[in-house]
Image (spheres, rainbow, N blue to C red):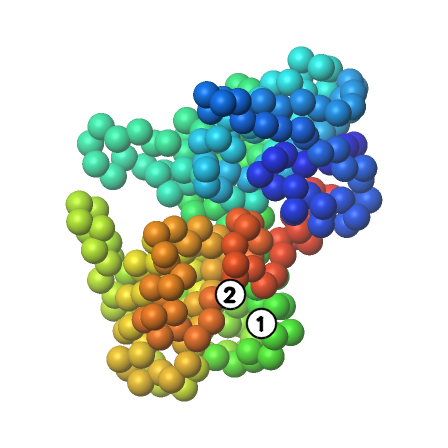
Amino acid sequence: MLLVAGPASQYIAEKMAPLLNLELMKVESKTFPDGESYIRFPKSVEGEDLVVVQGSHPPQDRHLIQAFLIAHNARELGARSVKLVAPYLAYARQDKRFLEGEAVSILTVLSLLRASGYDSVYTVNIHSPWIAEESPIRLVNVKAEGALAAHLLEAGLEKPLIVSVGKKGEDMASSVARVLGADYTFARSMRDRETGVVRVELGEVSADTALVVDDIISTGGTMVEVVKALKSRGVRRVYAACIHALLVDGAAKKILDAGAERIIASDTIPNDYMEFTVAGVLAEALSK
Ligand code: R5P
């Protein structure tokens, strides 16, 4: 078996290689002057079982095209099997037709991954885990909340009030609370589909320190509103934690300006706030 580091995720493939005890092959890549992507394998993959590590964080479309090129090239060059590890899988939030006529983009992405030559896709805390049932390709959702909780314990953040975001985030946040032996409450966020404005409703809050756990921070709009709501209830210190830190449009500054003391993120997406790695949980899932 050969671990293949795609251009988007070399840093994480490098952490996984020793855990899996696998040789690492770094894909060579460049962008042509007209914007097209180029990839090359520096060694033969004939007869090999490949595990390709290539996330699809921004620039999502470029990273997806690179993922397609890698699988198709691998198959043409005689690879026996090709798995994709996408620590962050793009388009997972467009998992249904919210408005009439919209594309269910995640199903398109999964179909194209299959068509390009992958046998299966491993990803971390996918926004829409139920999509596995409809997925045209085997989809393995690896949960990283255990790694987050272990990191929080190690960081000495033992018992802040844990706050979930949205109905879908309740399982994740309550499992972090269990590991920490901490209290737990919820924040329900509602986003207006047309205007993008987020409204927040909080459960019971009586704490000095709170840690908000969300699967993803993108524009930061949701986290900002939750942080403000907690502050307005008298919480003195608020930490903002997530698995996927997209942090677009100055999100980090907005969250810190809203009063959060610290942003805590994993390394599924390269970012300035990554404090813990998902390499271990991915390696474990692949070893099963
Ligand atoms: C919503 O369901 C998610 O859990 C996140 O809260 C949301 O996607 C974050 O997006 P943004 O940072 O743009 O508010």
Q: Is residue 278 above or below residue 138?
A: below
Q: Residue at x 51, y 65 (%)?
A: 264
Q: Is residue 31 above or below residue 177?
A: above
Numbered-mark total = 2
Camera-side residue: 254 or 214? 254
Q: Residue at x 31, y 29 (%)?
A: 103
Percent of width and height locating residue 180:
56, 75
Disc 1 residue: CB within 8 Å of ligand 1 = no
Q: Are marks 1 and 2 in contact (CB under 8 Å)?
A: yes
Q: Which mark is residue 264?
A: 2
Label 1 sits on a secondary structure element that is helix
Q: Residue at x 76, y 37 (%)?
A: 24
Query: What is the quadrant of the N terminus in the image?
Result: top right
Q: In which image quadrant can residue 94 be found?
A: top left
Percent of width and height locating residue 187:
32, 67
Camera-side residue: 14 or 85? 14
Q: Residue at x 51, y 26 (%)?
A: 65
Q: Which mark is residue 245?
A: none
Q: Is residue 19 above or below residue 225?
A: above
Label 2 sits on a secondary structure element that is strand
User: N-terminal of the two: label 1 or label 2?
Assistant: 1
Q: Is residue 222 above or below residue 235?
A: above
Q: Left or right of 19: which side holds 216?
A: left
Which residue does the numbered mark 1 point to in the structure image? 152
Residue 227 shows up from this direction: no
Percent of width and height locating residue 117:
60, 21
Camera-side residue: 174 or 267? 267
Q: Amino acid at mark 1?
A: Leu
Percent of width and height locating residue 288:
72, 44
* Mark 2 crowd level (few <14, some 14–19, many ≥20, 10 Å Cα): many
Q: Amino acid at mark 2?
A: Ile
How far apart in space, not on screen, are marks 1 and 2 (Cα)? 9 Å
